[in-house]
Image (cartoon, rainbow, N blue to C red):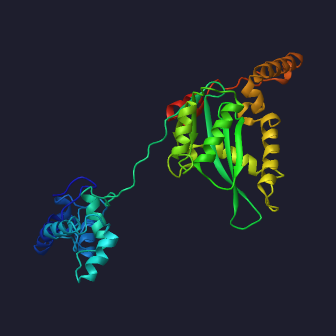
Amino acid sequence: MGGRKGRLIAADEKETAIALIKDACTQGARKAKACELLNIPIRTVERWEKQGVQDKRKAAARSVGNKLSPEEEQMIFDTINSEAYRDLPPTQIVPHLADQGKYIGSESTIYRLLRKAKQLKHRQASRPAKHNKPKACHAAASNQLWSWDITYLSTNVKGQYFYLYLVMDVYSRKIVGWHIKNSQNGHDAAKLMEDACKNEGLTDANITLHSDNGTPMKSATLLAKLQDLGIMPSFSRPSNSDDNPYSESLFKTLKYRPNFPRLDKFTTIEEASTWTHAFVQWYNTEHKHSGLKFVTPEQRHTGQDTAIFENRKRVYQNAKNTHPERWSGSTRNWIPPKTVSLNPDKKERQHSE
């Protein structure tokens, strides 16, 4: 019976050991000697006599006093999987049964049984559709991948807004088209894409256009126009702004400009258009974009950045040659990324990093 340290001993074996030790002591044996013969420490026997033989260690098997019988568990499964309740969660089933004067168990009990039977999943037939991450898009030059979105511009009338439609080239970050309207609709979106292609001199665009799942973005009018222009649409997952990060980042840049009218709201579309026109000019031709290694979107879009980076490389190399003691390694890397990716998968992201 006795044995190695840490071995779990059943309760009936403990009771048998205590009885044998007591019988030996009654016949004149010493308790310590009797414990030694059974290979059980005397302190252990004394603890059993004082606290009971129930094992309190975590690994010990225990019988639960209020455990459901197999018949009761089956009755619960028959009820919750019946036609009346199979599409309802336990939080709905329990009150329904209570209104009928029935109680089969608590919500936590039913959830535990569902988990045990691997039935703990969406129980409604109208479970939400699964949306996969959009396919990765890549651009190695301008006018291969565009991104567009619509943002609100507050007016001085509470609850009234103007809507800024804005298209950008993901490779160069250049704003290639924009306009401001009183509403959001597919007709205005189609006109915007047509104007953007004209501005860029594109007849057969062959562009991927990424957007979110808004109503204008998926309108039949816009999709028909995109087909005419040779543009392939791409969409984000519903309610997931991370799938369209370039447009979201551009809107943040726009609304965090120091002169953006936060307190003095726009009063007319003309006023909003004037401000946006100035912003687009600054952003495209003056703003040295951190994601482009600090050249402007216009310079990147037209290929002027190549000569700029070569000149910077020479400047840094000359500075290092003049004072080599001030440089502990190579000069600053002025080589821009050859391709830009939208929603790359994990392996592509790691390779890029």
In percent of the image, x 40 and y 48: which residue is there? 130
**In this view of the protein, which residue sits in the foreground, 125 or 56?**
125
Q: Is residue 35 above or below residue 140?
A: below
Mark yes or no: residue 56 visible: no
Q: Which quadrant of the figure has residue 35? A: bottom left
How many numbered dots are placed on residues in this image? Answer: 0
- Tell me residue 112's x, y (percent): 29, 64
**Residue placed furthest toward the right:** 322
Q: Is residue 77 left or right of residue 327?
A: left
Q: Which quadrant of the figure has residue 16? A: bottom left
**In this view of the protein, which residue sits in the foreground, 186 or 243?**
186
- Screen quadrant of the C terminus: top right
Mark yes or no: residue 327 visible: yes
Q: Is residue 244 left or right of residue 56?
A: right
In percent of the image, x 58 and y 47: which residue is there? 186
**In this view of the protein, which residue sits in the foreground, 9 or 78?**
78
Q: Is residue 217 left or right of residue 201?
A: left
- Tell me residue 82's x, y (percent): 20, 66
Q: Which quadrant of the figure has residue 7? A: bottom left
Q: Is residue 240 above or below residue 51?
A: above
- Tell me residue 227's x, y (percent): 53, 34
- Tell me residue 276's x, y (percent): 78, 47
Q: Is residue 58 above or below residue 319?
A: below
- Screen quadrant of the N terminus: bottom left
